[in-house]
Every structure is written in C-alpha cells, then in structure tokens.
Image (cartoon, rainbow, N blue to C red):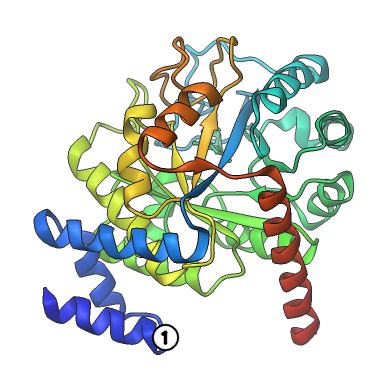
Amino acid sequence: MTDVFARVCGRLEAGELPSRRDIASLIALRGDGQAHLFSLAARARDRRFGRSVFLYGFLYLSTHCRNDCAFCHFRRANAGLARYRKDAEATLAAARRLAGDGVHLLDLTLGEDPHFLRPDGMRELCGIVRSVKRETGLPVMLSPGLLTAEQLALASAAGADWYACYQETHNEDLFARLRPGQDYAARLRAKTLAVEADMLAEEGILTGAGASPDDVAASVLHMARSPLAQVRAMSYVPHPVTLPAADAEESQAQELNAIAVMRLCMPDRLIPASLDVDGLRGMAARLAAGANVVTSIIPSGFGLSGVASETDIDTNLRDTDGVRAALEELGYAVADLSAYESWIEERKQRQRRQKGLCA
Ligand code: MD0
Ligand code: SF4
C-alpha cells in the first residue's frame, strides 16, 4: 500500500494524474489505508479552502420525469408515486426561506419533466430562475436533467450560474443499465455545452449501484480532465421500486474513498457532502474525506419531499441551523457569502480565459 501512496503522491506533486490502476486501489482501500487516504484528502482540502464550508439549499420543483432510471424512485415506471410540480410562488417562498437561513446557493432540481422541456415550460423555468435570483440575490444552480445547447443558452441568459447533470458512471455498459434508453454521449456533452454557454458545470457519480473500483477510477480520471467546477459522488439509496440494495456499508465506503480521491486529483474543485444519503450524521465522514460543500439543505420549518432519502427531514437536522451547529462542533465554519461569490466569479473568469485559449 505504501507503494501506491508513494506513486500517487509522486504523480500529483509532478502535476500529473495517477494511473487508473492506482486510483482503483485507493478506491478499494479499507482500514488503516483508508484512514490515511482521508487524512491526505482533508489536508488537500484545507490547503485550498481552509475549514470554511459552502452551503447549498435544495429546491425540488417537479417529480415528473420522462426517464426510467433504475436507481431512482421518480422513474416513469413508478405508477404508485403521487407526483408534484411546484408553481413559481411555492418555489419562491421556499427560496426566500433558504436565503434567509443563510445558504450560499439555491439548487433548483427537477426530474426530466416534459412540461418544463417544452418551449413554454422552458420559458417558465427560466422565469423562475430569474425571479429566484432577483429576490434572493443568491447564485443559482439548475439541475433539470439533459438540456439542449439552446436550452442551456436560455438558462444561462436567465442567470443560472451552474448546470448540474450527473452521468452516474463513465462505463457505458453500466450507464445503459442505470439510465436505460438515454444517450450517454449527449449527457456527457451537455456539461461541455453548459461551459460554452458560460455556466459552471457539475458532474456526479453513483456508488453502490454496480460500479467497480476500476469504474470509479475511470470516472475520476474523466472528470479530472473535463471542464467541471464541482464533482460529486453519492451512494445509491434503494427504494422498493428501484434496484435491489447493495451492501450499504460497502457503497458508502466507496463513496467516501471517491470523495477523497477526487479531492487529491482535483484539489481546486468543489466537492459536496450530500445530506441526501444519510442525513446530518453522514456529514462528518464526508468532510473528513475532503468535501467542502454541504448540499441538500432544506428550508427551515418546511416539510419537503423530493429528496432521495427522507432522513432527518422532519427534524431540524437538514436545515442551516442544524448544519451550522454540527459544522462548528467539528471545527469547521460556514463560509462568508462573499467568499462563495468570488470563488464563482474567479472560476467563471478562468473558464472564459481557457475558452479564449482554445478558440
Ligand atoms: C443533493 N439531493 O445535493 C441533492 C441533489 C442536485 N443538483 C443535487 C442530488 O444531494
Ligand atoms: Fe428522472 Fe432524474 Fe430520477 Fe432519472 S434520476 S428517473 S432523470 S428524476
């Protein structure tokens, strides 16, 4: 194991990425080796971001979806689900609450809802982005599934700072099983198109739903070479209508190792610790593995469905007060909004310079 760490650190210090094989061995680490991996990753995070953490508020706009993803209970085939689509007023009310609670970004998420993908729906969605920005002044992430170049340009013009669209895996066979009938290449390209439309892009992978350590390693390398400003790994949360449950401990160990390896290979990108896998109690381990953003924070005083795991929803453990107290207890602090805003601005400037260089 010392050999792997020596090779990986040597490559990283030389400004190169580790080999796929070495990354796969890190992903498979457990016990002392895993603890060492986490301490290296936490140090890399501290060097770049210190112990200040960004907070993302989560708003689910619609649980309607045209897709049939094997891992998601919002899949089209789930006839037993009572679905909702929020109107602009309901979304704005929740957005104002989250802004008052002190989050740094509002993440507007929805299934690939045919309503919002039609031209009039897209106008409505862009209108929601505009009013959320106008009323809260906060940066906005849009996570609406696969968009075309034209739709991405509209979202960017409406003020969306981020486009999130998760590939789940960079193994095309596994992708076809997880996202049946969906276009692998188009989904991948959407993130590059978002960058071309002057948004920041987020990619994400899923652990515990069939990815091997080698698959995760391939994803890490792919993401490291792509123009992504935020990268995430999340463990699969099983539901009665989705894929059979994997070994939960194993998939969470893989998620944590993926967070740590992403941090080592991509020290300057944002990496979330999502509350949507196992609530606030899972936050410490994700931060210890190198994450620097807490996501899936819900508005205080709102019951909210739409998240993958309903852990802690009915208590205050997924709102900013709960998160802030837990962060402080762990020796972290909530970053200033201005720090987040300047991070975004710098990253956008850098993206523009790089585009200029490539043009
Ligand atoms: C989260 N439930 O952060 C949210 C979601 C979508 N951009 C994010 C997966 O965990
Ligand atoms: Fe739809 Fe997204 Fe769920 Fe897939 S993961 S079924 S695209 S909501």
Task: Inspect this view and state whether residue 236 appears.
Answer: no
Quadrant in which residue 17 is drawn: bottom left
Depth order, front residue of 155/344: 344
Q: What amino acid is at disc 1?
A: Glu
Above or below — where is 153 with respect to 215?
above
Q: Is residue 128 left or right of residue 37?
A: right
Estimate the x, y position of residue 292 in percent, counting from the top left: 48, 50
- Quadrant of ligand 2: it is top right
Q: What residue appears at the point 48 percent right and 57 percent down from the top-left corner?
A: 50
At a point 21% along the width and 82% down the height, the residue shown is: 6
Q: Nearer the viewer, residue 105 or 208?
A: 105
Q: Which residue is at the far bottom? A: 14
Mark 1 = which residue? 16
Task: Identify which residue is drawn at 30% across, 86% down.
Answer: 10
User: Which one is in front, 120 or 252?
Assistant: 252
> Is 15 drawn above or below residue 335 in the view shown?
below
Specify the quadrant that holds the N terminus.
bottom left
Circle 1 residues within 10 Å: few <14, some 14–19, many ≥20: few
Residue 82 at x, y percent in the picture? 55, 10
- 192 or 201, nearer to the observer: 201
- Residue 207 appearing in the image: yes
Q: Is residue 234 above or below residue 150?
A: above
**Residue visible at 64% across and 15% down in the picture:** 84
- Residue 64 is situated, as x and y percent measured from the top left of the image, at 63, 24
